[in-house]
Each structure stands twice: as structure tokens, then as C-alpha cells.
Image (cartoon, grey):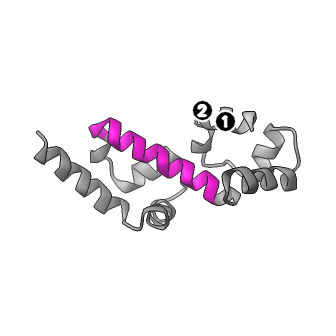
Amino acid sequence: MQQLEKFEEELKFTDNQMSLRLLSEEFNTNIPYLSKIINVYKGKNFNYYINDLRIDYIIELLKNDATYLNYDIKNLASLAGFTNAVNFSDNFQRKFEIKPSYFIKMMKENIKTHS
């Protein structure tokens, strides 16, 4: 669990090559064990775990620095560690039930009405 916390703090999930195999090697453990730990303690499979971390990371960037609101979806996807914009959008929509472009539009409108 400590290794997972460190992994999250160091934003290693933004590496678009990150996989369960790579992470298990980094943690000096085996794939089934790490997979079970993530399933039990994070309540989701490895892919959802990594992709949710990536989406949450982008949400934080968008909320804390308005500059990111001007990035296109492809750039945001790349920053988060997704290999393409479609994968990013699909995961964003799975998690929040809205498209990232619509979320960004709402955030921009929110900034306009509060300034």
C-alpha cells in the first residue's frame, strides 16, 4: 500500500507505458498479487485504477490552473498518460457521465460568471 501511495504521489501513472506488469516489476512482486491488492484496496481493476488516477489528475489541473482549460483534449490526454484522445474521452465519460469537452466548457463559463 505504501508503494502504491508513493506511485500516486510521484505521478508515475502519467507514464503512458505503465502497465500491471511494469508496476509489479517496480514493486518486486508478481502480477496476480498486485492485481488482487488493487482490486481489494482500491475497489477496481488495474485499468480503472490507472485511468481514474489519470482523469483525477487532469481534473485537478483544470480546477487549479485555468491555462489548462485552453488545452485541447489530445494534449490533456497526453499529459495524463493516455495514448490517445478517444481513450481519455471514453474514460472521462465512464467516470463522470459527461464528455471532457463539455466539462471544460462548463468550467470556462463558471470562470466568466465569477469574474
Residue 79 spot, x, y in % from top left: 47, 44
* Front in this rendered view, residue 109 or 43: 43
Q: Is residue 75 visible?
A: yes
Are circles 1 and 2 on residues that touch, CB within 8 Å? yes
Q: What span is colored magenta in the figure? A: 48-67
Whole-percent x, y for residue 88 in the image = 48, 59
Q: In the rendered image of this protein, does residue 43 appear above or below residue 78?
A: below
Residue at numbered disc 1: 5
Give the SS element for disc 2: helix
Mark number, residue 9: 2
Q: Residue at x 13, y 42 (%)?
A: 114
Q: Is residue 50 magenta?
A: yes
Type of the residue with mark 2: Glu
Residue 2 placed where, x, y %?
73, 33
Rendered image: mark on residue 25:
none
Label 1 sits on a secondary structure element that is helix
The answer to whether 110 appears left or right of 91 in the picture is left
The C terminus - image quarter: top left
